[in-house]
């Protein structure tokens, strides 16, 4: 267990956590579950409270603004899967003892700014400086939103027969962060223009607008059944998680998976399959089959590319990918290959 990088896998979750979640309370409508981005707690008057938590980033090789962006947006992406933006935020910061007060002010000003733009009120938390803290994870946060329960979506609500859509492209965050952390290597291997374009996609790693556009400003579109944001495991991993959470199988058409040239080139350089590595910024959306073009069209109006890549099927049919007219099982990668590629580049001396 100590040798693994990234999130724990579903087996460890089932073994250690799923049946040991404290006291059982009837108002917890959706608790911890593999492939589910948020928890839901029933409130009076037909309302519900959605909550999601994630680590906070502090990555010197990226920068303070970029670290603050990831800290806010990755949690916002999770909340976006409900169809609502986060409203409240709690932050726990365990900062390195060497982190200067001036840098902390810059970092927190960005956190404040990004939260303000989304409409998040920061309601509390904890901040401290810790001796021996050298991780790029600087603590954790929780975002909360309150909305009518009947309007809130959860990835487990998807149904067999739903179409599977993907916004933007595969491997957005992987390609962007690698290009930013190893700029000299990417410039030398792929050219200055490619390095700059890949780095510029860093701020495409929010999928909040994707989700809010899909359901409509006033939640007028009832054709969306579920959403799941793309993180570790990439687009294929996210589809696998959504299918598993909703107790369905899936059929994915490989040639339809959106892989833009920038992400393809950077991933090839780092020997990564863009379908399987961290892809924050993309959103998996399921909708009624007859609504596919309507969903794609309204996202297009907001300049968000959206592609139909497959459909959910009955669970007994499995989770399959069709590639070159051959059908095979989707293998869920419990260790995202991005991490190995990142540390290999460091150990190789790439700059």
Image (spheres, rainbow, N blue to C red):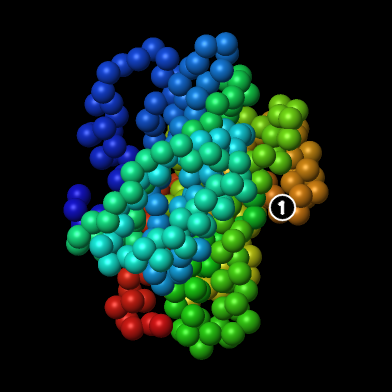
Question: What residue do we see at 44% from left, 78% from top?
Answer: 182
The answer to whether 140 is drawn above or below residue 323 in the figure is: above
| Horizontal relation, residue 140 to residue 173: left or right | left
Question: What residue do we see at 53% from left, 31% from top?
Answer: 145
The answer to whether 228 is drawn above or below residue 257 in the figure is: above
The answer to whether 30 is drawn above or below residue 319 in the figure is: above
Question: What residue do we see at 41% from left, 66% from top?
Answer: 103
Tell me where residue 151 appears, x and y as whole percent. Answer: 63, 24
Q: Which residue is mark 1?
A: 304
| Horizontal relation, residue 313 to residue 20: left or right | right
Does any portion of residue 174 appear in the rendered image? no
Q: Name the quadrant containing residue 214.
A: top right
The answer to whether 240 is drawn above or below residue 96 in the figure is: above
Tell me where residue 47 appears, x and y as whole percent. Answer: 56, 18
The 10 Å Cα crowd at callout 1, few under 14, some 14 to 19, many 20 or more, is some
- SS type, badge 1: loop
Question: What residue do we see at 56% from left, 64% from top?
Answer: 202
Along the line of sight, the residue nearer the viewer: 51 or 250 = 51
Along the line of sight, the residue nearer the viewer: 3 or 163 = 3
Tell me where residue 195 appears, x and y as whole percent. Answer: 57, 78
Q: Name the quadrant containing residue 291.
A: top right
Q: How many numbered circles does the render carry?
A: 1
Q: Quadrant of the C terminus?
A: bottom left
């Amino acid at each position: 267990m100590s040798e693994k990088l990234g999130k724990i896998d579903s087996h460890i979750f089932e073994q250690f956590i799923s049946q040991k979640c404290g006291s059982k309370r009837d108002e917890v409508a959706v608790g911890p579950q593999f492939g589910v981005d948020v928890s839901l707690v029933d409130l009076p008057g037909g309302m519900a409270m959605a909550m999601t938590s994630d680590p906070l980033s502090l990555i010197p090789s990226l920068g303070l603004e970029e670290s603050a962006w990831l800290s806010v947006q990755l949690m916002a992406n999770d909340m976006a899967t409900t169809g609502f933006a986060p409203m409240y935020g709690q932050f726990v910061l365990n900062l390195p003892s060497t982190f200067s007060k001036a840098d902390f002010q810059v970092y927190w000003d960005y956190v404040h700014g990004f939260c303000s733009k989304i409409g998040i009120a920061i309601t509390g938390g904890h901040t401290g400086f810790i001796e021996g803290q050298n991780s790029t994870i600087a603590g954790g946060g929780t975002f909360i939103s309150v909305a009518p329960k009947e309007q809130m979506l959860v990835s487990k609500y998807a149904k067999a027969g739903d179409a599977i859509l993907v916004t933007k492209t595969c491997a957005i965050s992987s390609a962007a962060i690698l290009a930013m952390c190893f700029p000299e290597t990417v410039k030398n291997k792929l050219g200055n223009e490619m390095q700059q374009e890949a780095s510029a996609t860093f701020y495409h790693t929010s999928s909040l607008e994707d989700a809010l556009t899909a359901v409509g400003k006033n939640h007028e579109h009832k054709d969306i059944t579920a959403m799941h944001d793309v993180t570790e495991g990439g687009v294929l991993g996210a589809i696998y998680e959504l299918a598993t959470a909703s107790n369905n199988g899936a059929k994915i058409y490989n040639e339809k998976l959106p892989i833009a040239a920038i992400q393809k080139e950077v991933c090839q350089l780092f020997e990564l399959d863009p379908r399987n590595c961290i892809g924050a910024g993309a959103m998996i959306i399921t909708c009624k089959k007859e609504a596919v073009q309507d969903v794609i069209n309204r996202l297009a109006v907001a300049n968000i590319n959206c592609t139909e890549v497959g459909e959910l099927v009955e669970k007994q049919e499995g989770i399959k990918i069709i590639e070159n007219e051959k059908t095979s099982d989707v293998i869920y990668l419990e260790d995202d290959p991005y991490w190995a590629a990142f540390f290999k580049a460091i150990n190789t001396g790439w700059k």
